[in-house]
Amino acid sequence: MYSENVTTIKALGRAAKKLINAFPDQRVFAFYGKMGAGKTTFIQAVCHELGTPDNVTSPTFALINEYKTDAGGSIFHFDFYRIKDLEEAFDLGYEDYFYSGNYCLIEWPEKIEPLLPQNVVEVKIDVQENGDRLISAKF
């Protein structure tokens, strides 16, 4: 279990590092949160902690972005907000990514929940009344 209250943008790096360290053997992370909760912003911090120098942006229209790490690995960032049915995820070849051993960071996983692997880490971002973000995760 992981839980972190994030009060500033600068604190996201620390929270991302703690998340990665809390689940050292996991590679598939599903990010849940309302529109505007900060999923993409937190994923940017996670990607930078994982060692990518790439510009991390939401793959809203492309559905998937690949980022290279300094060590030569890949990070796959998915955004399933715009898919209409599971067939689109099949067409994308989701299995090749989810079972590749590379990090897979998924926004809007509720759209493809039946396809998520059993070893997925569920990351929930809740916006607090004061604007802070409570980030929690479980495996």
Image: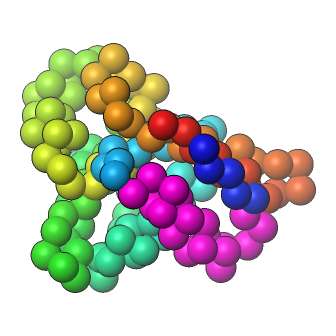
Q: Quadrant of residue 112?
A: top left
Q: Residue at x 32, y 77 (%)?
A: 51
Q: Main secondary structure of the magenta part?
A: helix
Q: Is residue 121 visible?
A: yes
Q: Within the magenta stretch, is there residue 4?
A: no
Q: Position of 132 compared to 65: left or right? A: right
Between 109 and 73, the residue placed more toward the observer is 73
Q: Position of residue 93 (x, y in %)?
A: 11, 34
Between 15 and 86, the residue placed more toward the observer is 15
Q: Position of 102 compared to 51: left or right? A: left
The stretch in magenta equals 6-24
Q: Where's the N terminus, which quadrant?
A: top right
Q: Is residue 28 above or below residue 9?
A: above
Q: Position of 6 compared to 81: left or right? A: right
Q: Position of residue 130 (x, y in %)?
A: 89, 56
Q: Which residue is outermost to the right?
A: 130
Q: Within the magenta stretch, is there residue 22?
A: yes
Q: Is residue 121 above or below residue 23?
A: above
